[in-house]
C-alpha cells in the first residue's frame, strides 16, 4: 500500500500508459485525446457555423465517457491514493522558479501563481490560462494530435509526421520555458 | 452499457496521470529545462513498450476484442501543419503545464483554474476548424 500511496516512478507509470494504449486499440479505438476538443465544439453547435464541425458526435460518445473517466480517475487518485502531494523536484528547478518569483515551489501539483482562484479572477491571470488553452486547442488540431496521439501512438507506430510534430512540441516548449517565461513572470 | 469499458480505461488513465505526477505543471517545466529524467522516462518507456504492441497489431498477432485486425490510423501528412501546429501546441503545453488528457484529470484533482484552459482549448479548436481550409498544409 505504501507503494500505491507514494508517487509512482516513471518505470511503473510509462508501462501503464502503454497498457492504456493497448486497451484503446484492443477495444477498437485509436489512442488520442485532443480530437475530443472538436467533438465538444460540435456538441456546442459549431456545425451551424462551419462544415468542419458537421459530424455526428454520437459516434464519439465512447470518447466523452472516457473523458468523464479521466476526471473521476483524477478525483480518486487525489482523494484516496495520495499520501502527499509534494513534488520531489530538482533543486535547480526550485531555484529557477524562485528566481522567477514563484513561491512554495512543488508543494502542490500546480503553482498558485497560475491556478489559484485569486489569480484567475485577475485580467492577467485569466488571460494567461485562456491563451495557453487556445494554443493547446489550435495547435493540436493543426498538428493533428497531442502527446497521446502523436508522441505515444505516432512515434510508437513509426510515423514520420509524429516525429515532426514532437520536434515542434519541443521547439514551442523550449521557446516558452527559456525565452518567454522570464518576460511573462 | 457498451461504453462502461471506456469509463474504466479513462479512470485508470486519470489515476496513472495523477500518480505519475505527469499532470503537474512543475514536471513539465522541469522537462523543458532538462533538469529531470522523470517525464522522459514516462514517455520513453510508454513509446518503447507501445512499439511492441504496434508490431503485434500490424502483424495480426493481437486482434481486437471482436477478433478483427487492429488498424492504426495514419497521421495526416503535411510538413508545415505538423511542425507549426506542433510548435503552437508546445507553447501552450509548457505555459499551462498540461496537455489535453491532464486538463481533464486536473479538474478531478480539484484545480478549477484549469477550466479556463479547457475553455481556451475548445475556442482554439473552434478557430482552427473555421480556418482549416485556409491554412497551409
Image: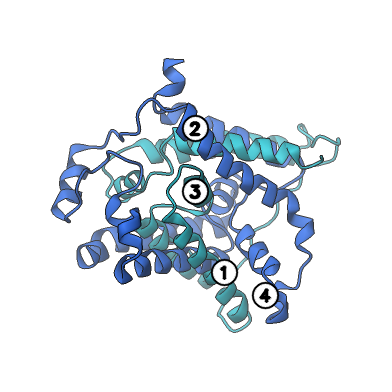
Which residue is label 1 attached to? B125
Alpha-carbon span between mark 2 and mark 1:
29 Å
Q: Could you tell me if residue B18 is visible in this image?
A: yes
Chain A as rendered: colour: blue
Residue A41 sits above or below residue B8 on the image: below
* Residue B48 in picture, x, y percent from top left: 53, 36
* Residue B20 in picture, x, y percent from top left: 44, 34
Label at residue A77: 2
Asked where in the image residue A36 lies, by quadrant, the reply is: bottom right
Which residue is label 4 attached to? A46
Q: Residues within 10 Å of mark 4 (few under 14, many from 20)?
A: many
Callout 4: SS: helix
Which residue is label 3 attached to? B107
Query: Between tags 1 and 4, which lies in front?
Result: 4
* Residue B39 in picture, x, y percent from top left: 39, 40
Callout 2: SS: helix
Alpha-carbon span between mark 4 and mark 2:
34 Å
Pointer 3 or 1: first along the chain: 3
Q: Residues within 10 Å of mark 1 (few under 14, many from 20)?
A: many
Is circle 4 on the same chain as circle 2?
yes
Alpha-carbon span between mark 1 and mark 4:
11 Å
Image-based side of B5 in relation to B36, left or right:
right
Q: Could you tell me if residue B48 is visible in this image?
A: no
* Residue A82 in picture, x, y percent from top left: 42, 28
Residue B22 sits above or below residue A83 on the image: below
> Which chain does tag 3 point to?
B
Instruction: Output the letter for the chain in cyan.
Output: B
Is circle 2 on the same chain as circle 1?
no
Query: Between tags 2 and 1, which lies in front?
Result: 2
Amino acid at each position: 500500500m505504501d507503494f500505491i500511496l507514494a508517487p509512482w516512478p516513471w518505470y511503473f507509470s510509462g508501462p501503464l500508459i502503454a497498457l492504456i494504449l493497448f486497451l484503446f486499440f484492443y477495444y477498437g479505438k485509436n489512442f488520442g485525446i485532443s480530437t475530443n476538443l472538436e467533438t465538444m465544439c460540435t456538441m456546442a453547435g459549431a456545425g451551424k457555423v462551419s462544415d468542419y464541425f458537421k459530424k455526428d458526435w454520437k459516434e464519439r460518445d465512447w470518447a466523452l465517457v472516457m473523458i468523464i473517466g479521466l476526471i473521476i480517475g483524477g478525483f480518486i487518485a487525489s482523494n484516496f491514493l495520495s499520501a502527499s502531494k509534494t513534488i520531489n523536484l530538482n533543486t535547480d528547478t526550485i531555484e529557477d522558479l524562485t528566481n522567477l518569483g514563484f513561491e512554495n515551489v512543488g508543494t502542490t501539483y500546480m503553482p498558485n501563481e497560475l491556478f489559484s482562484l485569486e489569480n484567475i479572477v485577475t485580467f492577467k491571470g485569466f488571460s494567461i490560462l485562456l491563451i495557453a488553452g487556445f494554443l493547446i486547442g489550435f495547435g493540436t488540431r493543426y498538428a493533428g494530435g497531442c502527446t497521446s496521439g502523436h508522441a505515444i501512438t505516432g512515434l510508437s507506430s513509426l510515423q514520420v509526421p509524429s516525429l515532426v510534430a514532437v520536434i515542434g512540441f519541443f521547439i514551442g516548449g523550449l521557446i516558452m520555458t527559456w525565452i518567454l517565461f522570464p518576460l511573462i513572470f | 452499457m457498451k461504453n462502461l469499458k471506456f469509463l474504466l480505461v479513462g479512470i485508470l488513465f486519470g489515476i496513472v496521470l495523477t500518480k505519475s505526477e505527469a499532470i503537474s505543471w512543475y514536471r513539465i517545466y522541469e522537462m523543458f529545462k532538462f533538469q529531470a529524467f522523470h517525464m522522459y522516462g514516462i514517455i520513453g518507456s510508454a513509446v518503447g513498450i507501445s512499439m511492441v504492441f504496434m508490431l503485434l497489431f500490424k502483424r495480426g498477432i493481437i486482434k481486437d476484442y471482436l477478433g478483427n485486425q487492429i488498424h492504426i490510423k495514419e497521421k495526416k501528412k503535411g510538413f508545415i501543419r505538423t511542425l507549426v501546429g506542433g510548435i503552437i501546441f508546445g507553447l501552450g503545453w509548457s505555459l499551462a503545464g498540461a496537455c489535453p488528457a491532464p486538463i481533464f484529470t486536473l479538474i478531478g484533482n480539484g484545480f478549477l483554474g484549469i477550466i479556463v484552459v479547457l475553455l481556451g482549448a475548445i475556442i482554439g479548436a473552434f478557430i482552427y476548424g473555421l480556418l482549416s481550409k485556409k491554412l497551409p498544409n
